[in-house]
Image (cartoon, grey):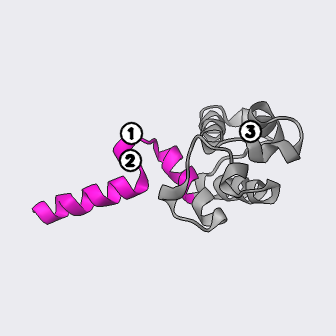
Amino acid sequence: MHWRLSLLLVGCLALGCGNNASETEIQVRKVIAAQLKTSPQAIDMNRSLREQKGDDLDLVEIVMTLEEKLGVVISDQMIEKYAGEKITEWPKSTPMELVRIVEECKANPSKGKK
């Protein structure tokens, strides 16, 4: 019984749920980590994607993957709201901004329409 609890705790901490991360945050972290070819634990949710070696093409791939995995539509307008009008500015956005975008699109699906 104790080993199961230990295994659950280790898994939870590895995914970031030890810090009360939302399911959306965990998914965003995983998608970014896969795109940037690093571990989810290495993703700093408050540092820009550019600081974490991401670029505008990475962000486009990340957004497309989030849309597919989470069943949301993220419009360019939603990204512009958080990250600026030019696609070249988008990598300056942080993973937490992507979490907010996804959560807003989940709460108000009409906002995400392209």
**Mark with earlier residue (1, 3):** 1
> Mark 1 and 2 residues: CB-CB less than 8 Å, in contact?
yes
> Mark 1 and 3 residues: CB-CB less than 8 Å, in contact?
no
In the picture, the disc for residue 81 is none
Determine whether, in the image, residue 23 is placed left or right of residue 75: left
Please tell me how crowded label 3 is: few (under 14), some (14-19), or many (20+) other residues with Cα within 10 Å.
Answer: many
Name the residue carrying label 3.
Answer: 112
Tag 2: residue type? Cys
**Mark with earlier residue (3, 2):** 2
Name the residue carrying label 1.
Answer: 20
Q: Which residues are magenta?
A: 1-30
Q: Nearer the viewer, mark 1 or mark 3?
A: 1
Q: Dot 2: what SS? A: helix
Find the distance from the CA under tag 1 to the CA under tag 2. 5 Å
Name the residue carrying label 2.
Answer: 17
Q: Position of residue 30 (x, y in %)?
A: 54, 58
Nearest the camera: 110 or 53? 53
Residue 21 is drawn in which quadrant? top left
16 is within the stretch colored magenta: yes
Q: Position of residue 62 (x, y in %)?
A: 69, 56
Residue 37 is drawn in which quadrant? bottom right
Q: Dot 1: what SS? A: loop
Tag 1: residue type? Asn
Please tell me how crowded label 2 is: few (under 14), some (14-19), or many (20+) other residues with Cα within 10 Å.
Answer: some
69 is within the stretch colored magenta: no
Residue plotted at (56% across, 44% down): 45
- Which image quadrant: the N terminus? bottom left
